[in-house]
Amino acid sequence: MKILFLNGPNLNLLGTREPGIYGQQTLADIEAAVRRRAEGRSIGVDFRQSNHEGDLVTWIQQARGTADAIVLNAAAYTHTSVALRDAISASGVPTIEVHLSNIHAREEFRHRSRIAAVCRGQVAGFGLGSYLLGLEAAVIVIESS
């Protein structure tokens, strides 16, 4: 079982960027926690981050036939990117949307996700736990297909 974790813009700044909202953990801390949770469970994890929308689109397209599921924190692109929405839809790879913060309890513009309709589900508001829950959700989706 292989799960691709994709992370969008500014997530490379975790740990220093608005820690009151996003927490103290760095993206490396989150990746390490996900890898620990996957360890010993025959789950391969591929973790990537880019500030460029095109990289994320390309990785989603390439996941077809190479990943069993995607866990995606599209960050700000969640609210703006039709390109990511279309890539998720076209890839056919089950995708779980994750967010560290509860996007529905924040600024109005963050309440709408352009990718939610083509994702299998959404996990938001649990900090690092959102990624761990995203991993578990991806396993459930894979095992039920």
Image (tube, rainbow, N blue to C red):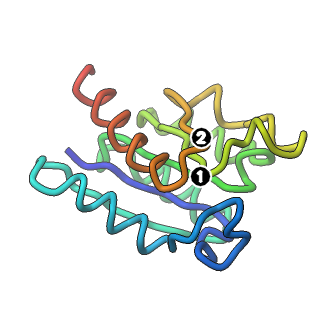
**Nearer-the-camera pick, 115 or 82:** 115
Packing grade of label 1 (10 A; few <14, some 14-19, many >=20) is some
Q: Nearer the viewer, residue 71 or 87?
A: 71
Image spot of residue 21 (x, y percent):
70, 59
Mark pair 1, 2: CA separation? 6 Å
- Residue at left offset 75%, top offset 47%: 81
Secondary structure category for the residue under label 1: loop
Q: Which mark is residue 48?
A: none
Judge left or right: residue 69 versus residue 103.
Answer: left
Q: Is residue 50 above or below residue 122?
A: below
From this viewpoint, which residue is outermost toward the front? 20
View extreme (right): residue: 108
Residue 44 percent across, percent down from the top left: 21, 55
- Place of residue 16 in the rendered image (x, y in percent of width and height, measured from the top left): 65, 79
Which quarter shows the C terminus? top left
Q: Residue at x 64, y 38 (%)?
A: 86
Q: Amino acid at mark 1?
A: Leu
Q: Which residue corresponds to mark 1?
A: 100
Q: Amino acid at mark 2?
A: Ala
Q: Residue 121, relative to residue 46: is it above or below?
A: above
Residue corresponding to mark 2: 124
Q: Nearer the viewer, residue 31 or 60?
A: 31
How many residues crowd around disc 2 within 10 Å: few (fewer than 14), some, or many (20 or more)? some
74 and 36: which one is in front? 36
Tell me if label 1 and label 2 are in contact, CB under 8 Å.
Answer: yes
Toward the top, the furthest residue is: 144
Q: Residue at x 42, y 54 (%)?
A: 62
Q: Is residue 85 above or below residue 32?
A: above
Using residue 7 as the reference point, say whether residue 53 is left or right of it: right
Of the residues under marks 1 and 2, which one precedes in the sequence? 1
Label 2's element?
strand
